[in-house]
Image (cartoon, rainbow, N blue to C red):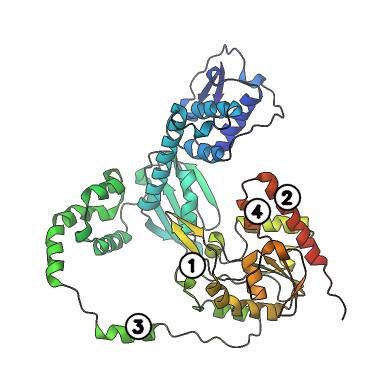
Amino acid sequence: MISVTLRSETDYSEWRAAARRLLQHGVPPEQTDWRGPREMTSFLDDLQKPWGSLSDTNTNTVVPRAFPELAERVLCHTDPERFAKLYRILFRLQSDPLFLNDSPHDDILWLHECDHAIRRDRHKMHAFVRFKKVGEGRFKREQFAAWFEPTHYITRLTAPFFTRRFPNMDWVIITPHCSARWNGQILTFDAGGKKSDVPTDDALEEHWKTYFQSIFNPARLKVGAMLSEMPKKYWKNMPETALIPDLVASAKVRQNTMETHGVTAPNPLASRLRSNQYPPPQIPDTFEDLSEISDVLTLCKNCDLYKSASQPVMGEGPDMSRLLIVGEQPGDKEDIVGRPFVGPAGQLLNDCLKQAGLIRSEIYLTNAVKHFKFVPKRTARIHSTPGSVEIKACNMWLQKEIALVKPEVIIALGATAAQAILGKAVTLEKIRGCPLPTKYGPTIFVTYHPSYMLRLPNTNQAMEIQKTFIEDLCQAALYQKPEK
């Protein structure tokens, strides 16, 4: 019997390293004894094969693509047998790669039930964390604290959501198992705490109550559905729930009053005020420098994307550059930070630029569309490809950037960027890597967008596309326009 003692309840990389080491030596699940840090008691001294005697080997472990993501989430479950059960599934996958598709098997049923529980617990944490203002820090950044009691060990898994949701304030979320802290730049984790670590009084509680009372619709009240979505175990940490008993008791009376009153006529002054509220922005015909474009871009309402995006994202780079790279649109990370190519696709672009011998700071990078177009899905914002309307609406900004930067070569990443430059829809494979003239003057090279490589399920194919992408970057960087 081999005992494996893990230092963390939720560290997937630690569990994976231990599991790989066992697999490399062919240790079957029934000969392992997995322990978490909360089970660190005395262990058997007469182990048949001491854990420390297993030396590392170079044997590769092969698993289906879906397993690592599932395992990382399920490790956050409170089931004390999760380490052993995950290793049992991993061991079986070595001889049966389709084992994850065996839905009736007890281990697979357990895996998906745990995953569902983790997803649900994360959803509840997203929805029911209530911050209390505790003061102001440096640069007058507001500081907040919250207490939450998740069912499982999900704090590390869930905290990044709050860095995206509340990037401009300092906060701490304290749970019994772990505390997450954000200072505007770095997310750190400490030991868990107690509810008393968070102040009890907070002026924001009255705002929560007012908001909740205002949106409570008595005509749509379904108590069973409400309790299913918002179980009572969370109520003690949510100030607005103190209003629920009275709101439920008076729901029928309020509904009858609403029906008797009928539709309220709009204030005659409202239409006149609305027409004066948002005058169309005055956009000059010419700009002296890129900073002027950036200032006016914040007023852009040429299409409807401004209504849901956090902010427009201006290009970034030197005032004049030989190379100008155009992407499709900002992503989720770019929309929050306000800079182009800072998300996963941007990181891949940085790596490829280095391999091509190019320096990002010497290149002007921008996007064909300046606002993030997305479809909300639960707690995520899923990228949606811009249409012709959005591309045309943003083209004026792209033209002005090109006119000021004066590049010799434009690299268009993907079909959307190519359409914005060439003025027509194109098939990427037909024109990729070919120097093409543009109405702006510079030569354009069209290649893949880094996000395309990130989406490819086949690793080998992704590596081949990345190699081609780097070659395209080199070709564009070295291109010299023929003499007339």
Residue 344: image location, x then y, percent: 61, 55
Which amino acid, by three-letter code, is at mark 3? Arg
> In the picture shown, does residue 265 fall above or below 220?
below
Element under label 2? helix
Number of residues whose C-alpha sits closer than 10 Å to that of mark 3, classed few (under 14), some (14–19) or many (20 or more): few
- Nearest to viewer (mark 4 / mark 1): 4
Alpha carbon of mark 3 to alpha carbon of mark 4: how far? 46 Å
State the residue at coordinates (66%, 85%).
Answer: 288
Q: Is residue 447 visible?
A: no
Percent position of residue 117, x then y = 40, 39
Quadrant of the image containing the C terminus:
bottom right
Pointer 1 residue:
310
Disc on res. 274: 3
Judging by the rendered image, the residue that carries numbered circle 4 is 453
Q: Amino acid at mark 1?
A: Ser
Is residue 336 shown above or below 93? below
N-terminal of the two: label 3 or label 2? 3
**Is mark 4 in CB contact (under 8 Å) with mark 1?**
no
Q: Earlier in the sequence, mark 1 or mark 2?
A: 1
Real-space Cα separation, disc 4 to disc 2, in angstroms: 9 Å
Q: Position of residue 173 (x, y in %)?
A: 43, 49
Q: Residues within 10 Å of mark 4 (few under 14, many from 20)?
A: many
- Amino acid type, callout 2: Glu
CA gap, disc 3 to disc 2? 55 Å
Secondary structure of the residue carrying tag 3 is: helix
Q: CA distance from mark 1 to mark 2?
A: 35 Å
**Which comes sooner in the sequence, label 1 or label 3?**
3
Query: Within the image, what quadrant is residue 57 found in?
Result: top right
